[in-house]
Amino acid sequence: MNYLFKRSGYYYLQGDYERAAQLYTLEIEREPEQPAHYLARAACLLNVMQKERALADIERALKLNPKSYVALELRGNYA
């Protein structure tokens, strides 16, 4: 189902984090006000050891939703 309807999630589950990050980037371009897209891309970037880029996405997500527990936890773990 993820392959058909949420391809970025499919690639994430398959461990293809770079391809998933590319697709999350497209989702960000379509819906830049959605903090979940930034957090999903941040998770991909952390898996491919791109900590600075991931932290930038986490900060963007926090600007959109300052009370996001997921974003606060990720920032606490990786900042």
Image (spheres, rainbow, N blue to C red):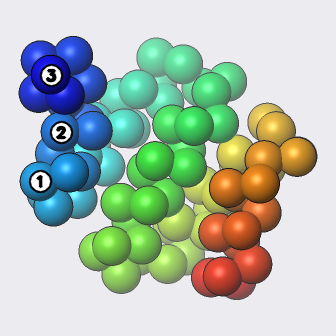
**Residue hosting label 1:** 14
Q: In the image, what residue occupies the spot 62% across and 82% down?
A: 78
Q: Is residue 15 visible?
A: yes
Label 3 and label 2: CA atoms lie apart by 8 Å
Residue reaching furthest to the front: 1
Q: Is label 3 in a helix, a strand or a loop?
A: loop
Q: Residues within 10 Å of mark 3 (few under 14, many from 20)?
A: few
Instruction: Find numbered disc 2 in the image and state the secondary structure of the residue it sits on.
Output: helix
18 relative position to 31: left or right: left
Q: Check contact, mark 1 vs mark 2: CB within 8 A.
A: yes
For the point 51% across and 67% down, the residue is 53
Q: Amino acid at mark 1?
A: Gln
Residue that badge 2 annotates: 10
Q: Residues within 10 Å of mark 2 (few under 14, many from 20)?
A: some
Can residue 19 be seen here? The reply is no
**What residue do we see at 18% from left, 39% from top?**
10
- The residue under label 3 is which amino acid type? Met
User: Quadrant location of the N terminus?
Assistant: top left
Q: Considering only order in the chain, which callout, 2 or 3, is on the residue closer to the N terminus?
A: 3
Residue 44 x/y as whole percent: 35, 60
Task: Classify 47 as above or below 3.
Answer: below
Left or right: where 36 falls relative to 20: right
Which residue matches tag 3?
A: 1
Q: Mark 1 touching mark 3, by CB under 8 A?
A: no
